[in-house]
Amino acid sequence: MSNEKIIPLPLFDTIDNINEPMPACVKLYLKNLDLPEVEQEFELGRKFLDSYSGSYDTFNAYRREIERFLHWCWLITGKTIKNIDRSDIKHYFDFSERPLLTWITTKNVQRFIIKDGIKIHNPGWRPFVVRISKAKHKQGNTPDKNNYNLSNNSVAALIAVLSTFFTFLQQEGYIEVNPVQLVRQKKRYIQKQQTHRVTRKLSQLQWQYVIETIENLANTNAKFERHLFLMAIFYLLGLRISEVAGSQNHTPTMSDFAPDKNSRWWFTTVGKGNKVRDVAVPDALLEALKRYRTSCNLSPLPSRGESTPLLSKDHGHGNLGTRQVRNLVQQCFDYATKRLRNDNKEDAAQDLETATVHWLRHTAISADIEHRPREHVRDDAGHESSTITDRYIDIDRIARHDSARNKQLKTTVL
């Protein structure tokens, strides 16, 4: 019998707490489901997620998908994973695109809270979250559960994660067949075309307004020096926000900038899949680094082993977190948007209002590919995994660095 009316409660805690004993609230929740083997399936889910604990973003994405699926199995179908077949998987794909309104919320909240010293479920948590664009938010619109929509990328991620999870269950000897792999024409769940295709990068004009606006502000007010340095990092290195912001697993420091034996500077970062890579540092970024460090009363260039955070907080210790980095980037976009409007460039201003931090990475890579060898851009951007060994050919690194040396922070608008 379906438990459709039961509101799902969070199952898995944060990446740091994934290996803690099952909270009493979760144990009671599973017991009340009155299904065989649910505790075993919870442990299998926990073990699966633990194998991805090396990457904060990957862990969170996989936790979201596994949690949704387990709740659907137990509450909607009244089945355990072991009894899910190909037909069920197809129904789950449909459900994910149109979940119950009671399963949707309009904001992200913590899964668990502490009350009287005891960990309990956060009553405001739901498996699905509806969001609206920044532009609509600025126009005074609010998220509406009835407008929940699963993007093409989200559908593709859902299918990939579920297939990986079932393969894991096969390897653990819990199931014999991967039902996701039995579903034919999975691509039909992913729209091949979008009505409104968004180019998620800044135009040359928009970028020029962003960088010039922040540079002008920094020239008159030292508090914008960090904004300027942040924009230089994103544009000249093409980094992801997770490679710039501090997290529980990674804290960028100034010593991530370092020269090699040929006096060429590199920035070492930890990318997707917890993979370490070196990114060639162009001369323009070295100048931006010197400017920022001087404004912080530091030596122009960092020393090896220096523990100074890459982007120090205004108050307290450590590096800026993801939310703080997003806020700084948004401030840069807002100032540039205002200036675009003042110059009667309304179309560019409206488009910039929808931009996110990740647009900077696409902007950087798109500009890079125009004048650098593709394989150099690929390696700097970390698009493909590669093992860097002591036998790495220096001449290749020299060529890659030379092609990056003359990247400019500002370009001429025709």
Image (tube, rainbow, N blue to C red):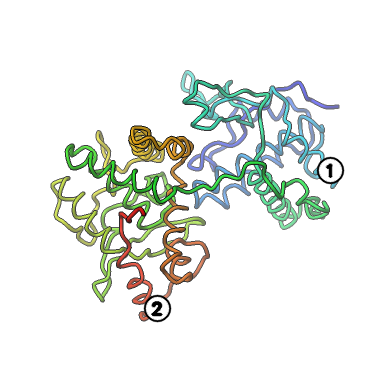
Q: Which residue, given by chain and number where applicable, does mark 1 sit on?
A: 83
Between residue 356 and residue 300, name the one nearer to us. Answer: 356
In the image, 343: left or right of 259?
right
Q: Which residue, given by chain and number where applicable, does mark 2 sit on?
A: 396
Q: Residue 165 location in percent, x, y?
A: 69, 50
Between residue 82 and residue 103, name the one nearer to us. Answer: 103
Task: Name the residue located 49 percent from the left edge and 23 percent from the top edge.
Answer: 139
> What amino acid does circle 1 point to?
Asn
Q: Secondary structure at mark 1?
A: helix
**The N terminus appears in which quarter of the rendering?**
top right
Alpha carbons under labels 2 and 1: distance apart: 53 Å
**The C terminus appears in which quarter of the rendering?**
bottom left
Q: Residue 4 location in percent, x, y?
A: 78, 25
**Is disc 2 surrounded by few (<14), some (14 to 19) or many (20+) residues within 10 Å?**
few
Between residue 78 and residue 275, name the one nearer to us. Answer: 275
Q: Secondary structure at mark 2?
A: helix
From the viewer's perspective, is residue 14 above or below residue 288?
A: above
